[in-house]
């Protein structure tokens, strides 16, 4: 996984990795959730990837748009 930059130092996200239609997000508590386009929507996956690469806004977006639309909890 790639470390999340968190440019404002206020995020609950610590790392991420993604493919074409999915993203896995690791939170500071160690939990990892996988979001897939089938459940969260491809537009939301694309936005999450952009925010992850930008290092800002990912945690907020998850809480507002896709919090319970994850495909699986990995840990």
Image (spheres, rainbow, N blue to C red):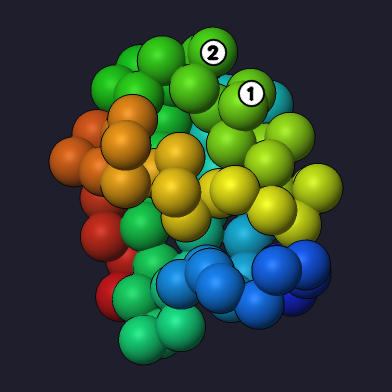
Q: CA distance from mark 1 to mark 2?
A: 5 Å
Q: Give the residue drawn at x 56%, y 73%.
A: 10
User: Picture quarter containing residue 14?
Assistant: bottom right
Q: Which residue is mark 1?
A: 46
Residue 61 position in % (x across, y down):
45, 40
In the depicted structure, whether residue 33 falls above or below residue 50:
below
The quadrant of the image that shows the C terminus is: bottom left
In the depicted structure, whether residue 23 falls above or below residue 1:
above
Q: Which residue is mark 2?
A: 43
Secondary-structure class at tag 1: helix
In the depicted structure, whether residue 42 falls above or below residue 69:
above
Horizontal side of 8 relative to 70 (left or right) equals: right
Horizontal side of 45 relative to 1 (left or right) equals: left
Which label sits on residue 26? none
Q: Between residues 15 and 62, which one lies in front from this camera angle?
A: 62
Q: Give the residue drawn at x 41%, y 15%.
A: 41
Residue 12 position in % (x across, y down):
46, 72
The quadrant of the image that shows the N terminus is: bottom right
Q: Give the residue drawn at x 51%, y 14%.
A: 42
- Most extreme residue toward the left, as rendered? 68
Horizontal side of 11 relative to 15 (left or right) equals: left
Circle 1 crowding by C-alpha within 10 Å: few under 14, some 14–19, many from 20: some
**Numbered disc total:** 2
Residue 54 position in % (x across, y down):
81, 48
Q: Give the residue drawn at x 54%, y 13%.
A: 43
- Most extreme residue toward the bottom, as rendered? 29
CB atoms at circles 1 and 2 under 8 Å apart?
yes
């Amino acid at each position: 996984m790639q470390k999340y930059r968190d440019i404002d130092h206020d995020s609950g996200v610590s790392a991420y990795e993604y493919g074409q239609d999915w993203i896995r997000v690791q939170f500071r508590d160690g939990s990892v959730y996988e979001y897939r386009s089938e459940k969260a929507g491809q537009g939301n996956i694309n936005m999450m990837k952009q925010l992850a690469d930008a290092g800002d806004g990912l945690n907020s977006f998850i809480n507002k748009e896709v919090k319970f639309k994850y495909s699986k909890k990995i840990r």
